[in-house]
Image (cartoon, rainbow, N blue to C red):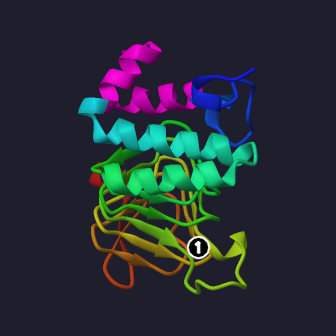
Amino acid sequence: MCGVRGIPREASPALPGGSFLAAVRSDLSRLRPAERASVLRLALRCVTSPELLAAVIVRAQQALHARGSTTAANALRTLGVVLVGIDVSAGARIGARVLFAHPTGVVIGNGVVIGDDVTIAGGVTLGSRNPGPDFGPEEYPTIGDGVVLSSHAVVLGAVRVGARALVGAHAVVLDDVPAEAVVVGAPARQVASRDAVA
């Protein structure tokens, strides 16, 4: 049985909540916590919210990729670049309630794993240090739950950014970041703990 435009309604392990619509609703809950939107209201919100439109495109890519429709997923990737300037590989694993705050310029590589409740600001790049034909998912970063990636932050290679860490604007992360850490600079260095700045 199919849902929206050929995207399966049945549970998908690649999508938070198991379905396209559940994943999009989880992302909307970051923008409007009290709203339980119908499909029509979600569509109307996309017109006025580039953050939600980016999430819808990414979730549709994930759903299509999970069912083996890589050509359609890649077409949506191009649409995301054209409409909102976000370039997310369909193979990236993105948790529930992601928030693409000002999604223009965001680039997320194929093997990236992103936890739940992550905020990704404009211009963020998550990818491999050595792009080429001979690299796999182990070359990409893993982003923990509740992480904030500020504007134009760059996280490269097989690094882990711990839960609730804050990566400052224009930081270049090349090594693991502990949970709750605040890192800034190029290369990134820890300057505080998240609870110290809250």
Q: Is residue 102 left or right of residue 112?
A: left
Reading the image, the residue beneath label 1 is: 159
Q: Is residue 106 visible?
A: yes
x and y, in percent, of residue 78 in the image: 45, 57
Q: Residue at x 75, y 48 (%)?
A: 68
Main secondary-structure element of the magenta-colored stretch: helix
Name the one closer to the observer, 186 or 44. 44
How many C-alpha atoms fall within 10 Å of the one at disc 1: few (<14), some, or many (≥20)? some
Magenta stretch bounds? 21-46
x and y, in percent, of residue 87 in the image: 44, 60
Image quadrant containing the N terminus: top right
Q: Residue at x 68, y 49 (%)?
A: 65
Give the amino acid at mark 1.
Val
Residue 26 vs 181, above or below: the answer is above
Q: Residue at x 58, y 83 (%)?
A: 131
Name the one closer to the observer, 16 or 42. 42
Looking at the rendered structure, the secondary structure element under dot 1 is loop
Q: Residue at x 56, y 32 (%)?
A: 23
x and y, in percent, of residue 191 in the image: 33, 72
Q: Is residue 69 left or right of residue 142?
A: right
